[in-house]
Amino acid sequence: MSSNLLKGNAVIGQSGGPTAVINQSLVGVIEGLAGSLCINKVLGARHAVSGIIKNDFIELQDIPQDRLDRLAQTPSAALGSSRDKPDAEYCKKIFDVFAKQNVRYFFYIGGNDSSDTCRIVNELAKKENYELRCFHVPKTIDNDLVNNDHTPGFPSAAKFVAQAFIGDNLDNRALPGIKINIIMGRHAGFLTAASMLARQHDDDGPHLIYVPEVAFDIEKFKADVADVYSRLGRCLIAVSEGIHDENGTSIMTTLAAEVEKDAHGNVQLSGTGALGDYLSTLLKDHLGKDTRVRADTFGYLQRCFAGCVSQTDAHEARLAGRTAAELALAGEHDGSIAIQRISNSPYEVEYKRIELSDVAAKTQTLDPKYIMHGNDIDASFRDYLAPLVGELPVVESLRTH
Amino acid sequence: MSSNLLKGNAVIGQSGGPTAVINQSLVGVIEGLAGSLCINKVLGARHAVSGIIKNDFIELQDIPQDRLDRLAQTPSAALGSSRDKPDAEYCKKIFDVFAKQNVRYFFYIGGNDSSDTCRIVNELAKKENYELRCFHVPKTIDNDLVNNDHTPGFPSAAKFVAQAFIGDNLDNRALPGIKINIIMGRHAGFLTAASMLARQHDDDGPHLIYVPEVAFDIEKFKADVADVYSRLGRCLIAVSEGIHDENGTSIMTTLAAEVEKDAHGNVQLSGTGALGDYLSTLLKDHLGKDTRVRADTFGYLQRCFAGCVSQTDAHEARLAGRTAAELALAGEHDGSIAIQRISNSPYEVEYKRIELSDVAAKTQTLDPKYIMHGNDIDASFRDYLAPLVGELPVVESLRTH
C-alpha cells in the first residue's frame, strides 16, 4: 500500500466560493505533478464533485507554462466550482468513477467541507483496498480553517476590504455622514476585521467593527454609532453579514421585525443589500431622518476582484498546491496542507501536512484577544494581518499634518 | 480689467462626489500657481462653497513637493466636499468673502453644478467691477459634462467597474446563475457601459447592459434574461441605478409597486441595495424560486477605491488643474477646462478653455450609436474607452482554448 511508485491518473477539483488565487493552487498541483512517471493524465473535474460523478473532466497535463502562468493569475475557479456537499452515497459515486478511471491521486482545493469530502472518499478507498492518495488544498476567504495560520484566498480578499475602506474613509471624511459596509463572513470575522488595516491617521475609520464572534446588541449598536457621530461628525462602520443576537438568531431576521414594527410594513427579507439597508433605517430612526446614512454591501466583489491580489497570497496558494502534489508523489497517502507561520519578522511560513480529520468540518474563529468592547478590533491584529496583505496605498491628509 | 499682473489670493475648492483623482487636480492648480508673483496665499476652501462662506480655509502654498505628490495620489477630496448648490444669494456671500479677502483667483473642481457656481460668482464680480479670475476644473465619474471628450474621475471609476466585472464574470462562470450588478449613474450610462470592457473571451459577461439613456421595459428585461440564461446557463447583468420607464419614472418606484403586488407586501423603498434586490425578486418570480439570482450594488466603492486608478486619468486630472492655473495667470478671465481628444491612435488630448456657460448645468449622455437593442453596448465603445482606462488584467480560460 505504501509504494512510492503508484501509477495512474490524477484528479483535481476546485470547490465552494471561488477566490482570487484558487487557480494558483490549481497550477501548483499541475506543476507538482508535471514530469512524474507515476502520473498518466491530470484530469480537471468540471464543477468539482458534480463533474467527477458525471465523468466531466478536462485534461490538464499538456498546458504550456506561459498559459499556466496566466491561468494562475486569473481569479475564480477555472475548472468551475460547486456548492454540493457530498454525503456517503455521493462519495461512493466519486470513488466508483475513480476506480473505473484508474484515478490514484485526488487533490481537492476548497474549504472545510472539501476536506471532509476528501476524508470520506479516502476512507471508502481504504475499505475497498484501492490505493488512492487524497489531498486537500486549503482555500477560503473566510480564513476559518483550524490548524492553519491563515488560508489562501483570505489575504487577497482582506486586501480588497482594506483598499475599499481606505477610499471609503476618505469619501466619508469629504462628505460626512454615517456609512455602513457589510462584509462577507457568516461565522468568522477575519475579513471584517481586516477593515482595520485602513486606519493610517488619527480619526480614520472604520470607527466601529462588528464581527459574528460576539453577540450583536441592537441598542448598544445605536448608542455606539451615536457616540462616534457626535464626537467626529461622521462614522464609518464595518459589519459582518453574519452578525446575530445572543440566541444565535441572525440580525437580518431580528431587524426585519423591528423595522417593520417601526415603519409600518415594507420589509424585504431576501436580497443581498437588505442587512445594510435595515441597519441604515434603524440609525435614521434613532438619529433623525435627515441624518446622512448610507450602506454598501461588498458582496461578491471582495472574493474575485481582478487586479487586487496579495502577492504573498498568490505565492502561498501556488506552493500549497505544489506541496500537496509533491507529498502525494513522495508516498504520503492523505492529508491537508496547512500553512503555519514560523516567524513574523521576517515573515516566514511552512507548508505542513496535517490529518484530514484535523481540519474537516471544523470552523476557526477570531481569537477573542483581538475583539475590543464588542465593537472594535485591537491594533495587534495588524501584526498578524499586515504581512499577509502586503503593501497598501499610503494616503496623505491635509487635516492631520 | 485685463491686466496680466492681477495680484491677490487664490481659492481652490473641491465639490460634489469625490473621485480617485480629484486631488490630482487640486495639486495641479497648486503647482500651476506656485512661484507666481501675482499670488499671495493659496487658500483651500474646507468643504467647498460651505467653507468659503464660513471663512474656513487652509493654506496650501507652502506644502513641500513630496507631500503634494502623495496628496495627488490620495483618493477623495482632501479639502472636503459639499453637496450645496449655491443660489444667487449664496453666491453673493461667496463673492463678499472673496472681496474682503482680496481673492482674485478662484478654481472650482467639480461637475456641471460647480461650473454654474463659477459662472454666477463670476458675473457678480463683473457687476461689481471686481476683477476676479474664475475657473472650473472638470470632475465627475458620471462623465456627463458636455463639450468634453471625457472627465477626470470617470476613467478610474470605469477601471474599477471593468476589473469588478472581469472577476465577477469568472465567479459567475464558476458558480453559474443570474447576477445583477447595479452601477452609479442617474442620467448618463457611461460608467455602466464601461462594464463591457470586461469581455475578453466568447460568452464573457456582462451579457446584458441597461443604461438610463433608454426607457427600461420590465417585461423585455425578464425576456432578455430568460433568453441568455437558457442559452448559457448563466447571465451577468449591468444595470444603471438611474434606469426609468418610458414616462421617466424610476424603476425603483415602479418595481416597488410590482413586487409588492406580486409578493403581497414587504417592499422597502429606501436604502442602496434595494434596486438590485427588487430586480432579483422579479427574476426569481419569473424563472422559478430555485433559480440562483444574486445582486450587488457597487455603491461608493466605485468612485474612491484606493489602488485602482487609471494612470491616464491621474495624469489628465493633474494637467487639467495646472492648465486652469496657468490660463488664469496668463490673463484669461474665466472658463472651464475641457479635455478634448485630438487623436485616438496614438491617444492624444488637449486641454482647452471653453466658456463656463458652455458646460454649466448641462448633461451629456451616451451617444445612441453605442446602445444596442436597448440592452447592450456596441463593441465600438471599446475604442473610445480603452485608451482612458489603460491596461486591464488579462485572464486565461480553460474553456475557450
Image: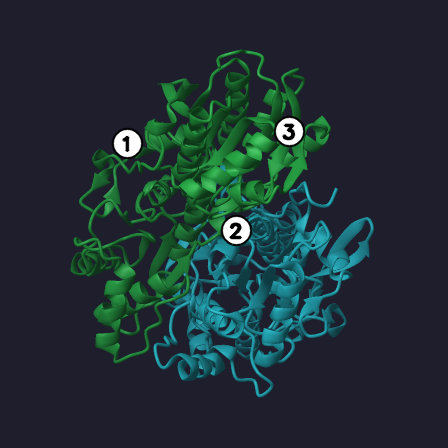
Chain colours: A cyan, B green
> Residue B259 in the image: x percent, y percent?
25, 71
Q: Could you confirm whether marks 3 and 2 are on the same chain?
A: no
Above or below, comparing residue A367 to residue B88 in the picture: below
* Contact check, label 1 and label 2, Cβ < 8 Å: no
In this view, the residue in front, A224 or B274, is: A224
User: Residue B79's spot in the image, x, y percent?
Assistant: 60, 41
Which one is in front in this view, the residue at disc 3 or the one at disc 1? 3
Kindly state the secondary structure of the residue where label 2 is placed.
helix
What SS does tag 1 mark?
Answer: loop
Place residue B89 in its image quadrant: top left
Quadrant of image for the C terminus of chain A: top right
Amino acid residing under circle 3: Val
Q: Is residue A286 left or right of residue B185?
A: right
* Disc 1 to disc 2, C-alpha distance: 32 Å
Q: Identify the residue position indicated by label 3 in the image.
A: B42
- Closer to the N terminus: mark 3 or mark 1? 3
Locate residue A166, reporting x and y percent: 61, 50
What residue does disc 2 label? A23
Q: Residues within 10 Å of mark 2 (few under 14, many from 20)?
A: many
Which residue appears at 36% of the width and 47% of the height?
B185
Q: Identify the image quadrant of the N terminus of chain A.
A: bottom right
Tag 2: residue type?
Answer: Asn
**Does the rendering let one see residue B222?**
yes
Instruction: Using the numbered discs, state the Cα–Cα distance from disc 3 to disc 1 in whole angstroms.
Output: 44 Å
The residue beneath circle 1 is B380
**Within-10-Å neighbours for mark 3: few <14, some 14–19, many 20+:** many
Circle 3/circle 2 CB separation < 8 Å: no
Instruction: Give the chain letter at badge 3.
Output: B
Disc 3 is placed on an element classified as: strand
In front of the other: B227 or A70? B227
